[in-house]
């Protein structure tokens, strides 16, 4: 298995632009998580899905952030409009088998820089 | 991370043993994960303890006391490649998600 796939690996954009991050979870996994990591705030859970349905989006910082999972093999995290404080590494992770008791497999991350 | 505390930084010598502690609020948690994250890379799974006691995996061991809300990760025979951030994370039974600590940055020196 290729593991969790994220694209792009690096994104540099200007303030006000729309940014779309993509994730392909491991086949068969029924949970998908979006995290943001910064030096100041550590690893923060933004939103997670179970069987393509958003379960908890309380970590999404503002309405500028939105996430979708149209099918079991694809998810997007969109920021519109982007701001410099959104600069961070965004990780997607997936897990299998019920709830949060199982190991999460992380993708390589997308390093976002907003100028 | 919310409700999880671990030291920010630790330093140890190559070949030595180091213990990284993690405390958490007991309500709503069921067991504890440890992840390793090298600089510039994604976190990777190390261990999961659901029962009290010590679990050993080679040079790494993890301990859990559910009643005390306490866990530690023990690294033996330290190697330079063990320099990384170590994150403890608790599955939250109330929210169906894991809460991560801020991580402990371990530096192994020659």
Image: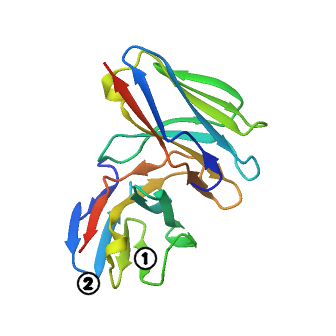
- In the image, taking residue A83 as reference, residue B85 lies left or right, namely right
Check the image and report above or below for B6 versus B95.
above
- Quarter assignment of residue B65: top right
Mark 1 secondary-structure assignment = strand
Q: Which residue is mark 2?
A: A17
For label 2, the crowd category at 10 Å Cα-Cα, with few meaning under 14, some 14 to 19 and many 20 or more, is few
Decide which of tag 1 and tag 2 comes sooner along the chain.
2
The front one of A49 and B56 is B56
Q: Identify the residue at horizontal 36%, vertical 72% (top origin).
A: A86
Q: Identify the residue at horizontal 43%, vertical 56% (top origin).
A: A93
| Location of residue A26 in the rendering, given as x and y in whole percent from the top left corner | 38, 54
| Location of residue B14 in the rendering, given as x and y in whole percent from the top left corner | 36, 17
Q: Which mark is residue B74?
A: none
Q: Identify the residue at horizontal 49%, vertical 75% (top origin).
A: A61
Q: Which residue is mark 1?
A: A68
Front of the two marks 1 and 2? 2
């Amino acid at each position: 298995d290729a593991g969790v796939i994220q694209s792009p690996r690096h994104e540099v954009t200007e303030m006000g632009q729309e940014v779309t991050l993509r994730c392909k979870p491991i086949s068969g996994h029924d949970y998908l998580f979006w995290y943001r990591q910064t030096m100041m705030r550590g690893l923060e859970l933004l939103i997670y899905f179970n069987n393509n349905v958003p379960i908890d989006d309380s970590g999404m910082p503002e309405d500028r952030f939105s996430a979708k999972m149209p099918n079991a093999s694809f998810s997007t995290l969109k920021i519109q409009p982007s701001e410099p404080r959104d600069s961070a590494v965004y990780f997607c992770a997936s897990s299998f088998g019920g709830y949060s008791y199982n190991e999460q497999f992380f993708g390589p991350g997308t390093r976002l820089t907003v100028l | 991370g919310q409700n999880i505390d671990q030291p920010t930084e630790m330093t140890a010598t190559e070949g030595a043993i180091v213990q990284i502690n993690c405390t958490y609020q007991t309500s709503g948690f069921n067991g504890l994960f440890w992840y390793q994250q090298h600089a510039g890379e994604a976190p990777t799974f190390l261990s999961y303890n659901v029962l009290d006691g010590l679990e050993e995996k080679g040079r790494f061991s993890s301990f859990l006391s559910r009643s005390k809300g306490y866990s530690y990760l023990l690294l033996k025979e330290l190697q330079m490649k063990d320099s990384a951030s170590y994150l403890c994370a608790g599955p939250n039974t109330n929210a169906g998600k894991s809460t991560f600590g801020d991580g402990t940055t371990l530096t192994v020196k020659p």
